[in-house]
Amino acid sequence: KITFNREADEKNQLYGSISKKEILDYLLENNIKVKSDDLTIKDQIKSIGEHKIEISPYENLVKEISILVNKN
């Protein structure tokens, strides 16, 4: 699981969203190299909670990863 802590309003909506670059940077900091084209965010991450993304490093191989967003 990948975890981010963000500011959010009273309806748990983020002030902004979690970007693909932020996820790639997080993975790189943890010694996981993923190309931008191999990362798919189906729905923008704009709220507190758990969200799913897909990483597809090789053809016919897709891994679903959870992104957990906590409120600061």
Image (cartoon, grey):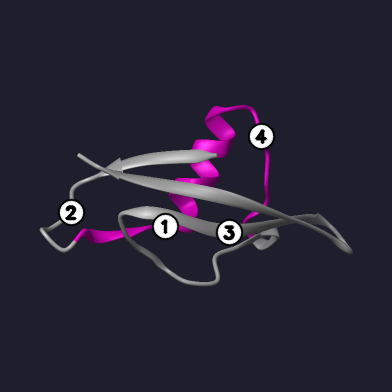
Q: Which residue has dot 4 on it?
A: 32
Distance (Cα) linking label 1 and label 3: 11 Å
Q: Which residue has dot 1 on it?
A: 19
Mark 4: few, some, or many residues within 10 Å (few <14, many ≥20)? few
**Residue 36 coordinates in the image, percent (x, y):** 62, 57
Q: Is residue 29 in the magenta section?
A: yes
30 left or right of 21 in image = right
Q: Are marks 3 and 2 in contact (CB under 8 Å)?
A: no
At label 2, the amino acid type is: Ala
**Residue 41 coordinates in the image, percent (x, y):** 54, 65
Q: Are marks 4 and 1 in contact (CB under 8 Å)?
A: no
The number of callouts visible is: 4
Distance (Cα) linking label 4 and label 2: 28 Å
Distance (Cα) linking label 1 and label 2: 16 Å
Distance (Cα) linking label 4 and label 1: 17 Å
Mark 3: few, some, or many residues within 10 Å (few <14, many ≥20)? some
Which segment did they paint magenta? 12-36
Earlier sequence position, callout 4 versus callout 2 = 2
67 left or right of 70 in image = right
Q: Which residue has dot 3 on it?
A: 53
Q: Is residue 24 in the magenta section?
A: yes
**Secondary structure state at the residue bearing disc 2:** loop
Q: Which residue has dot 2 on it?
A: 8
Which image quadrant: the N terminus? top right
**Residue 63 coordinates in the image, percent (x, y):** 73, 53
Mark 2: few, some, or many residues within 10 Å (few <14, many ≥20)? some
Q: Which circle, 4 or 3, is nearer the viewer? A: 3
User: Residue at (88%, 62%) from the top-left corner?
Assistant: 59
The vertical placement of 40 against 8, above or below, is: below
Residue 9's quadrant in the figure?
A: bottom left
At label 4, the amino acid type is: Ile
